[in-house]
Image: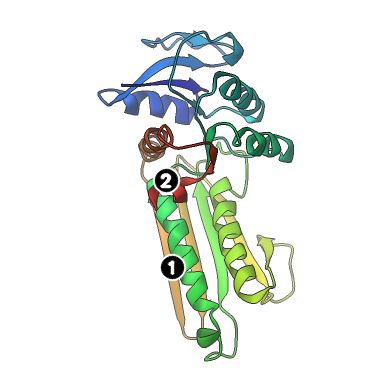
Amino acid sequence: MLNIIINGCYGKLGSSIVNAAYNTKFCIAAGISRTQRSTKHHFPVFNNINSCDINADIVIDSSSAQGTKAAVAYALEKKLPLVICTTGLSDDILTKITQASKSIPLLVSANMSLGIAILTKLTKIATEAFYSQNFANNFESKTDIEIIESHHSQKKDAPSGTALLLANTINNQIKQLTGAPCNFALGRQQNLSKRGTDEIGIHSIRGGNIVGNHSVLYAFQDETLELRHTAQSRKAFADGTLYAAGSLINMSAGLYNMDDIIF
């Protein structure tokens, strides 16, 4: 049985992880939440991770930027592996994460879904094919790449962290192949010029209770290829988080992502 501390246990993902952990090899040893809720759990909940005196095997952070900063310091002090699911992290926190990974196993991902990890891998394969010299030489124009993401109406950030993960993955692949990175075009409503050949378009949709949809569109001469992932519930993210936690527990100090865990 693996004992877990969840930093952000009352959040959308944190609550899903708690529910997903029942009847598995995982046990929620403690939760952390800055705001107390009426929901009762079978484990103690602390309002500050530094107040947590419960022994555990691993920490999962699904809180906020400040919560992540505290979780990194806590995991480093306790020498515990740490899975970070929080997005929108500042450069300062990312630097602290990199430094901490020299001493503990640390996994960071903008999306914990196993399907998104596979989609990210597929974008690498597709981008390498479209930007290979043999392929490009057969067409007069480059392949145009557009990313479309949809989420519920309460999501604050746009584009989503997953859309940026996909865009950065594709951009890094293009840079390796051509030596010239692309620019990100966030929507087109204020742009009256034609689409550039050196850009990746990113478009955000917000509405209803959409859990998360992401599409990567490759448009080239007379054909289009679309890679798409649809999350039907947050359980997909919770299951992926627990999968990552179970793998990270056996790994040495270092900075990992979902690609490292699966492939």
Q: Count the labels in the image.
A: 2
Instruction: Quickly name the residue at label 2.
Output: 261
Q: Are marks 2 and 1 in contact (CB under 8 Å)?
A: no
Relative to residue 223, is residue 49 drawn left or right? Answer: right
Decide: few, some or many residues near mark 2? Use Cα within 10 Å; few <14, some 14-19, many ≥20. some
From the viewer's perspective, is residue 230 above or below residue 129? above
Q: Residue at x 49, y 29 (%)?
A: 81
Name the one closer to the observer, 27 or 34. 27
Helix, strand or loop for disc 1: strand
- Label located before the other in sequence (2 or 1): 1
From the viewer's perspective, is residue 160 above or below residue 49? below
Q: Residue at x 55, y 40 (%)?
A: 254
Relative to residue 26, is residue 147 drawn left or right? Answer: right
From the viewer's perspective, is residue 139 above or below residue 80? below
Amino acid type assigned to the residue bearing label 2 in the image: Ile
Q: Quadrant of residue 24?
A: top left
Helix, strand or loop for disc 2: helix
Q: For the N terminus, which image quadrant?
A: top left
Asked whether residue 103 appears in the rendered view, the answer is: yes
Name the one closer to the observer, 87 or 54. 54
Decide: few, some or many residues near mark 1? Use Cα within 10 Å; few <14, some 14-19, many ≥20. few
Picture disc at residue 30 = none
Instruction: Quickly name the residue at label 1.
Output: 226
Q: Residue at x 65, y 27 (%)?
A: 69
Asked whether residue 34 appears in the rendered view, the answer is: no
Amino acid type assigned to the residue bearing label 1 in the image: Glu
